[in-house]
Image: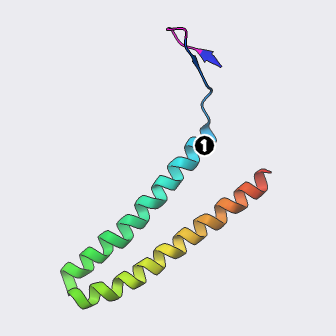
Amino acid sequence: MTSNSEGKTQSPTSYRQTRRRTERNLLFLVIFVLVVGGTGLIGLIWGLNAMILSSVCLISGAALIGGLWLLLTLIQKWVDE
């Protein structure tokens, strides 16, 4: 533990935990932009019917991205043990 100028002790920085949190936040941002942004743009350009169909495809694509991320995260935890 380190102490700052006020005499309070600080716990050490966990870079692995920070990296995991950043990766998770980026994953959520990518999925949100893919589904909401993509569906919205398709709806604006081609209309409601295309938007409904594209939302199904984009959600399944987002599920694939999330599944791959989950698989890689589990492999990383398994290797770290």
Of 70 and 9, the residue lying toward us = 9
Residue pictured at 43% horizontal, 78% vertical? 59
Q: Is residue 28 left or right of residue 71?
A: left
* Image quadrant where residue 45 sits: bottom left
Residue pictured at 41% horizontal, 59% vertical? 29
Q: Magenta region's main secondary structure?
A: loop
Q: Is residue 60 left or right of residue 48?
A: right
Q: Is residue 53 left or right of residue 65?
A: left
Percent x, y of residue 48: 22, 87
Residue found at the far bottom of this picture:
49
Percent x, y of residue 28: 45, 60
Percent x, y of residue 72: 65, 63
* Image quadrant where residue 44 sits: bottom left
- Looking at the rendered structure, the kind of residue marked 1 is Gln
Label 1 sits on a secondary structure element that is: helix
Q: Is residue 11 above or below residue 42?
A: above
Q: Which residues are magenta?
A: 3-7
* Image quadrant where residue 74 sits: bottom right
Image quadrant holding the N terminus, namely top right
Q: Is residue 4 left or right of residue 49?
A: right
The magenta stretch spans residue 56: no
Residue pictured at 38% horizontal, 65% vertical? 32
Q: Looking at the image, how many numbered discs can be counted on the residues?
A: 1
Residue hosting label 1: 17
Residue pictured at 40% horizontal, 84% vertical? 56
Colour scheme of the picture: rainbow
